[in-house]
Image (spheres, rainbow, N blue to C red):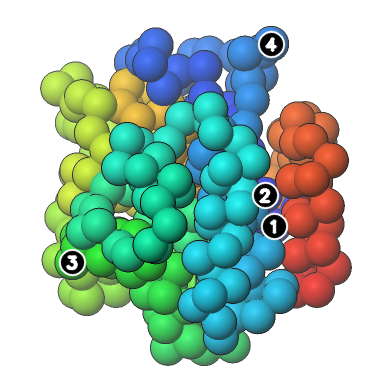
Amino acid sequence: MRGIIGAIAGDIIGSPYEFHSIKSKDFDLFSRKSTFTDDTIMTLAIANWLCVNKDSKHVLINNLKYFGNMYPKAGYGGRFMEWLRHDSPEPYGSWANGSAMRVSPCAWVADSLEEAQDLAKKSAIVTHNHPDGVKGALATCDAIYLARLGASKDEIKDHIELRYEYFLNRSIDEIRPNYKFDVSCRGSVPESIICFLEAENFEDTIRNAVSLGGDADTQAAIAGSIASAYWDVPKNIAYKSIHRLDYRLLKVFIDFEEKFM
């Protein structure tokens, strides 16, 4: 299985390690603490927007607010929580990685790289209108779209470095020892992309992301969203992830799969 399941599986697998970081790839993929968080919820909010009306900013904002307020304890950042509660849905200049973790549906709907970039920017700027927030969403979406079309890792890496000036010539072993929790796009999206570039398969990508010891669920969601366009997500991982969604989120996932996949 390929598609937005990569972001969902990455989020769920990484969730127990978000605030209990590890610096090892040797861990159980699933446990009783493995659950969906804001990464999955916002990814599916974007998916539902694209199913309903991808040209409507109003529908986009309503979806983010509706799903966000439906799950108020899912682990949102403080400023995003304020945005969810506020009557006037103005963006707040966020440079955080929430724009990148929710963007994957845009890459699967688009018929061209330009359309993917347009959708990614729209999905970001309603909250994350800081240049770094937009860049994180665009870079992630580009990587997914190119992987979806069969681009090689070198082609993806060269494109991201040239267009977005992310420094990707680092290894996981070089990053891991001194890496700390970082929710900024600038400090987490390049590392998430490297987790994919250095991996041997989908599972290895997720293990790389969690092992950095940073924002584990979000970085695994970002890395996983790229990896699931390059490789199939193993059936056991997809199955265990899907079965951790509640009925409302599962319905959105199925609707998106049926319409676009």
| Mark in front: 1 vs 4 | 4
| Mark in front: 4 vs 3 | 3
- The answer to whether residue 197 is left or right of residue 253 is left
Q: Amino acid at mark 2?
A: Ile
Q: Residue 145's x, y, as percent?
A: 50, 72
C-beta proximity under 8 Å, tags 1 and 2: yes
Per the model, the C-alpha gap separating discs 3 and 1 is: 30 Å
Q: Secondary structure at mark 2?
A: helix
Q: Amino acid at mark 1?
A: Arg
- The label on residue 2 is 1
Q: Residue 187's x, y, as percent?
A: 19, 43
Q: Residues within 10 Å of mark 1 (few under 14, many from 20)?
A: many
Foreground residue, 261 or 1?
261
Circle nearer the N terminus (1, 4): 1
Q: To which residue does mark 4 refer? A: 32
Residue drawn at (57%, 63%), measured in percent from left and top? 62
Q: To which residue does mark 3 refer? A: 131
Per the model, the C-alpha gap separating discs 1 and 4 is: 25 Å
Q: Residue 239's x, y, as percent?
A: 81, 36
Per the model, the C-alpha gap separating discs 3 and 2 is: 27 Å
C-beta proximity under 8 Å, tags 3 and 1: no
Residue drawn at (41%, 29%), measured in percent from left and top? 216
